């Protein structure tokens, strides 16, 4: 068995993509087939793999994907950021409230989302890199501050973004472009997936092909060696948090594009899913090792689990338990791999 695995690992396509990412893709396919079989049994013939179900899963994966891409940079440096979900909601609340109550143009509100996320990321990064506070503590503090800022700005009111037929509703085509075909049938094109993949390619180039990305990875693997080599580690560490916060702001755009209403004081449950997607994808919690492609695949696993569990009529609590089990397994595998190395 071990010889067969080694032969499979030695195949050129597997080496090009990465053995762990190939395995993760196979797990994603098996997960889809498993939910297909279970939903047919539980729902008496109703299947999971339909176009509508897949679009719903993809919609859920948009904002989780952008947050996961951002937190990959932070985890690569050996840090953590638990504030991204609350920052996403704060950006959606503030910019949406400005549209509804202050008459801001929709384009300006969309620009506000990543800018708000960038500010939170800058504060978080400053506290970690310059004040030298633990990222665990600072991100928990920023999570509570983001909740408070969003709630206070909107006076604890829900904020509803405009629908497709309302003024300013054009932004929804960023996530899903709907084309009416002959006969009145509507074709839903997931344009958000194209944008997510484009941003992922850019993140991969930054992380693996630029000096900034290499320094971030080296910070996670051997911070002391980077510091002794004369590199200003604070500059690159704060950059990782700025990227993370900015992408959390972009996640807000795609969240409101799919789900319309933003609730104050919420969002912190999405932190765990974004972090789980990173770890599932091969990013080491100890830092120094990260995979953007793996993060994308891990994001789709989270989305498929969420949609599959709902398709079977089960509580979303089952998803939390399943995500936790997979996350713990991924961390154990990462620790075992590091010990062997």
Image (cartoon, rainbow, N blue to C red):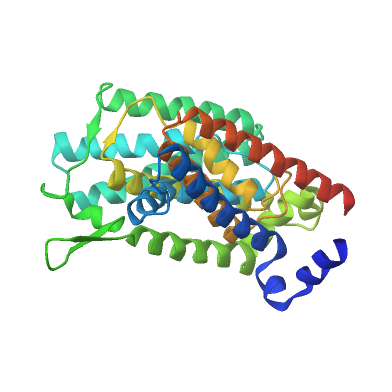
Residue 91 in the image: x percent, y percent? 35, 39
Residue 7 in the image: x percent, y percent? 81, 71
Instruction: Give the residue at x 50% y 61%.
Output: 200
Residue 122 in the image: x percent, y percent? 50, 43
In the rendered structure, the answer to whether residue 292 lies left or right of residue 13 reads: left
Name which quarter of the figure residue 22 lies in.
Answer: bottom right
In the rendered structure, the answer to whether residue 41 lies left or right of residue 279 reads: left
Name which quarter of the figure residue 13 lies in.
Answer: bottom right
Against 300, residue 325 (above or below) is above
Can residue 171 be spotted in the picture? Answer: yes
Q: Nearer the viewer, residue 28 or 107?
A: 28
Can residue 69 be spotted in the picture? Answer: no
Q: Nearer the viewer, residue 184 or 299?
A: 184
| Image quadrant where one finds the N terminus | bottom right
| Image quadrant where one finds the C terminus | bottom right
Against 301, residue 123 (above or below) is above
Q: Nearer the viewer, residue 174 or 24?
A: 24
Against 189, residue 280 (above or below) is above
């Amino acid at each position: 068995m071990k010889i067969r695995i080694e032969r499979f690992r030695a195949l050129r396509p597997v080496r090009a993509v990465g053995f762990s990412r190939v395995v993760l893709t196979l797990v994603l396919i098996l997960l889809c087939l498993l939910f297909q079989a279970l939903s047919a049994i539980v729902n008496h013939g109703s299947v999971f793999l339909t176009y509508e179900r897949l679009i719903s899963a993809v919609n859920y994966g948009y904002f989780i994907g952008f947050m996961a891409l951002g937190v990959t940079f932070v985890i690569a440096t050996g840090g953590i950021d638990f504030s991204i979900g609350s920052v996403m909601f704060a950006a959606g609340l503030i910019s949406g409230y400005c549209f509804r109550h202050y008459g801001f143009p929709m384009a300006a509100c969309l620009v506000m989302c990543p800018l708000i996320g960038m500010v939170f990321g800058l504060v978080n990064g400053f506290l970690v890199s310059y004040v030298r506070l633990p990222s665990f503590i600072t991100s928990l503090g920023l999570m509570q501050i983001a909740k408070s800022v969003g709630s206070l700005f909107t006076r604890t009111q829900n904020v509803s973004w405009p629908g497709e037929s309302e003024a300013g509703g054009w932004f929804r085509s960023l996530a899903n472009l709907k084309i009416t075909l002959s006969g009145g049938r509507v074709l839903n094109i997931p344009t958000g997936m194209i944008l997510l993949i484009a941003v992922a390619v850019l993140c991969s180039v930054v992380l693996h092909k630029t000096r900034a990305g290499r320094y971030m990875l080296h910070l996670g693997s051997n911070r002391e060696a980077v510091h002794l080599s004369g590199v200003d580690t604070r500059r690159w560490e704060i950059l990782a948090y700025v990227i993370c916060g900015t992408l959390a702001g972009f996640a807000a755009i795609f969240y409101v594009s799919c789900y319309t209403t933003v609730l104050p004081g919420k969002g912190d449950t999405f932190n765990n899913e974004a972090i789980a997607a990173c770890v599932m994808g091969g990013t080491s919690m100890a830092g120094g090792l990260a995979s953007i492609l793996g993060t994308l695949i891990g994001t789709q696993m989270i989305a498929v689990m969420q949609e599959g569990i709902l398709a079977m009529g089960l509580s979303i609590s089952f998803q939390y338990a399943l995500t936790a089990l997979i996350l713990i397994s991924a961390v154990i595998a990462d620790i075992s791999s590091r010990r062997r190395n």
